[in-house]
Amino acid sequence: MSFYCRLGPLPAIFLVCLVTTGLESRFCEAAGSMYVVEAEAALLRDYPSPDSGILTRLDHSDQVEYLDANASGWWKVRSLRTGVVGWMTSDLLAAAPPKLPLSIPTKTEYYYVNTPSIDLRVIPLHSSATTGTVQLNDRVEKLGFSPAGWTKVRNPRNGHKGWLPTRYLSAKLVSSTAPAAQPYKKRVKRAAPPKKKQKIEKTAPVEEIPKPM
């Protein structure tokens, strides 16, 4: 008879190692591992023997927690449904599927268009092709943003997606009487007007009066 362990040395975790007798083998398991009842039903007993008393009945797909085992293939488990601890044969169990991590839904941000009408662009450039148009107080969904002052949105009304300048979006509805955002205009630096030359007035020379001798 030989003993070996599938999981290797794990400090602070109680392991029951595999016992090999001829062609029969049972893997070692770590305390706390989760399993499900694979059979239609299973009996949880006082001791690892088919002649021992019955504690409770487990149904198909009931989950149990592995606690201990012996060399005869009996496992000591705890029923998650009832909390009862007892013995059953390991051939009635299967490994429980791993729990999938819970996905945290991202918060959807909505904004309102604060200008009478503006085109949605394919890329965040005024010269880009358009994908649609949004109107004043259209509610749009934020999809992304650009550090250059653009926001990518989706119009839920028709599904159109595109970029528009962030300044055309507001967190609240805009009053129709409120002044709309000014359209984009390219600023041109104007040259300063030339300075006027100051006129210098010429004065007549002052005649000197000769002093008396």
Image: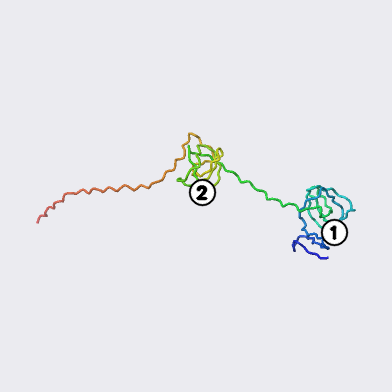
Q: Position of residue 170 (x, y in %)?
A: 52, 41
Among numbered discs 1 and 2, the one appearing first in the sequence? 1
Q: Secondary structure at mark 2?
A: strand
In the picture, the disc for residue 128 is none
Work out whether residue 174 or residue 77 is closer to the camera in this orientation and state it. Answer: 77
Please say if 57 is above or below 11.
Answer: above
CB contact under 8 Å: marks 1 and 2: no
Q: Secondary structure at mark 1?
A: loop
Q: Whole-Å distance between the Cαs marked 1 and 2?
A: 66 Å
In the picture, the disc for residue 72 is 1
Q: Position of residue 81 (x, y in %)?
A: 79, 47
Front tag of 1 and 2: 1
Q: Position of residue 32 (x, y in %)?
A: 77, 55
* Amino acid bearing label 1: Ser
Outermost residue to the right:
51
In the picture, the disc for residue 146 is 2
Outermost residue to the top:
177
Taking 165 as reference, is 4 left or right?
Answer: right
Q: In which quadrant is the C terminus drawn?
A: bottom left
Instruction: Residue at 55% x, 45% y: name it.
Output: 143
* Amino acid bearing label 2: Ser
Outermost residue to the left:
213
> How many neighbours does mark 1 have within 10 angstroms: few (below 14), some (14-19), or many (20 or more)?
few
> How many neighbours does mark 2 have within 10 angstroms: few (below 14), some (14-19), or many (20 or more)?
few
Please say if 109 is above or below 85.
Answer: above
| Res 1 quadrant in image | bottom right
Instruction: Residue at 31% x, 47% y: name it.
Output: 193
What is the basis of the colouring in this image? rainbow
Outermost residue to the front:
23
Work out whether residue 42 or residue 168 is closer to the camera in this orientation and state it. Answer: 42
- Total marks shown come to 2
Q: Position of residue 148 (x, y in %)?
A: 48, 49
